[in-house]
Amino acid sequence: MSVHRAQNAAQRPSRLALPVIAVAAAVLLAGCGQQNKVDPELTATLIQPVAKLEVKVSKVAPGSRTGEQIYKAVCASCHDSGALNSPKTGDAGAWAPRIALGFDGLTSSAIAGKNSMPARGGASDLTDTEVKRAVAFLVNQAGANFTEPPVEQ
């Protein structure tokens, strides 16, 4: 009987520990459902932009762009890389048969469009004189010696 009492005495602390742990856990978990108060003013001051982008649109009067400006804005996207089998800027071998067509022949092709190149290089707002400037600028990079029409002031 004394062995039985000793076993019961050893089990009492573990029997009491389980309800105490359960109550402590319940107290801790009771606070988990509460939301913290958020100060919208503080939140707004803590959220700052990483960068700021400003876009300015600069209108250029039709007819006043140089060949280089037109080339950079319109032509370079294909002719720099040779996209859609376009002759690369500065490639004298690729441009030689085209240069042989003469300035007027090249300009007519650029205005009307040729192969994958749309009319006016896809920039429908270009005047005929601006197309001539762009053609002269582009083809002169490959060794032609065409005169770019001047921009009137």
Image (cartoon, grey):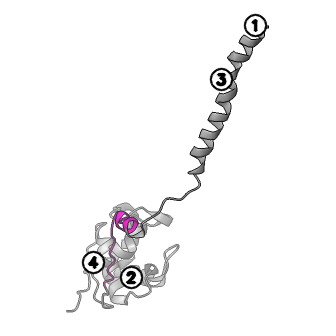
Q: Amino acid at mark 2?
A: Thr
Question: Quick check: marks 3 and 4 in contact, CB under 8 Å?
Answer: no
Q: Amino acid at mark 4?
A: Phe
* Label 3: element kind: helix
Q: Amino acid at mark 3?
A: Pro
Q: Nearer the viewer, residue 131 or 35?
A: 35
Q: CA distance from mark 3 to mark 4?
A: 103 Å
Residue 123 sits in which quadrant?
Answer: bottom left
The residue to which callout 4 is attached is 146
The residue to which callout 3 is attached is 13
- Disc on the earlier residue, 1 or 3: 1
Q: CA distance from mark 1 to mark 3?
A: 17 Å
Q: Residues within 10 Å of mark 2 (few under 14, many from 20)?
A: many
Q: CA distance from mark 1 to mark 4?
A: 117 Å
Residue found at x 63% / y 40%: 23
- Disc on the earlier residue, 2 or 3: 3
